[in-house]
Amino acid sequence: MIGPDFLERYHDENAAITEDLLDPARDGTGRDPYQWLVEGLALVVGAPGVVLDLACGSAPVATRLPDDGPGYVGVDLSAAELDEARRRRRDVEVHQVAAADAARVLEGRTVVGVSVAMALMLLDLDAVMGPLRDVTTSGTRLSAIVPTRTPAPGAEDFAGLLRDLGSFAVPFPEPLDAATTGDRLGSLGWRLLALEEQPFARPVRSATDTETIARSFYTCGSGMARAAVADRLRTLQRSARALHYPLRRLVAERV
């Protein structure tokens, strides 16, 4: 069960696991997933204000923002993730606050973009997006990347991992599907602009890579499932093949 207690414990025990998983991954144009996420914000160079990064983890989004762009404020409930953010990124501004309560750390600053990396599928959309109406203005962009549990053709190895773990096609708490997400965001004051999928090639070169990828799945499965995952990842490593990891990007705009 993916609940708040599980997530807090998982991230305290695996700080920076999401960044370690995605940082080496690249799409066909050479972008990493966090660059793709930030592109969805359509930031205006020189614009005042901040990007609010919900469930920021180790704050990898902070280093993908343009040098002459807005500032950065990250929030997360995991103390271990935030400690890792400060260790990896000197002077980064992060706060131990739930995503739904993020507004209280902004101190009157203007939010010009909202980012959510690999977390929106686990957050209560109503609880998070509703309060953001009070700290954003018309035209503010939300950009989120989420994993998929129904990968498209071309991601057979990833689909195999999900099947090993019994997670294939199992919906997240927030499925963020095309059929209902637009209406739900609309009722909360946001307009859905795009919901698109992009594969990223994640190298599997070492035992460290296989361990990182295996630990990144919230669903651990049985001992037999974990053994199947490890065997599949070792096969990728021996054949020098990357894991084609499909991600979805949701882009919305405050109305």
Image (cartoon, rainbow, N blue to C red):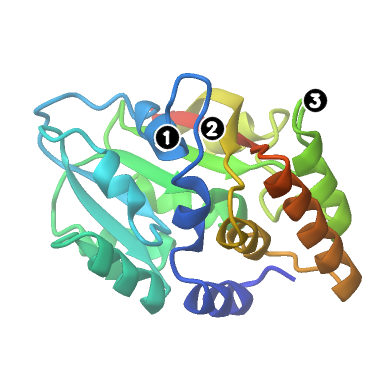
Task: Give the alpha-carbon distance from disc 3 to disc 1, as whole Å.
Answer: 23 Å
Q: x, y percentage for residue 208?
A: 56, 62
Identity, as a three-letter code, of the amino acid under mark 2: Arg
Mark closest to the chain's N terminus, 2 or 3: 3
Q: In the figure, is residue 231 to the left or right of 116?
A: right
| SS type, badge 2 | strand
Callout 2–callout 3 Cβ contact below 8 Å:
no
Residue placed under numbered mark 1 in the picture: 37
Instruction: Tell me the CA gap for discs 1 and 2.
Output: 7 Å
Asked whether 54 or 12 is in front, the reply is: 12
Q: Position of residue 226 (x, y in %)?
A: 81, 67
Q: Quadrant of residue 154?
A: top right
Residue name at image x 72 percent, y 47 percent: 238
Q: Which mark is residue 153?
A: 3
- The N terminus: image quadrant: bottom right
Between label 3 and label 1, give the one nearer the viewer: 3
Q: CA distance from mark 2 to mark 3?
A: 18 Å
Residue lying at 69% horizontally and 68% vertically, measured from the top left: 2
98 horizontally vs 199: left or right: left
Label 3 residue SS: loop
Q: Is residue 13 above or below residue 246?
A: below
Which label belongs to residue 249? Answer: 2
Q: Residues within 10 Å of mark 2 (few under 14, many from 20)?
A: many
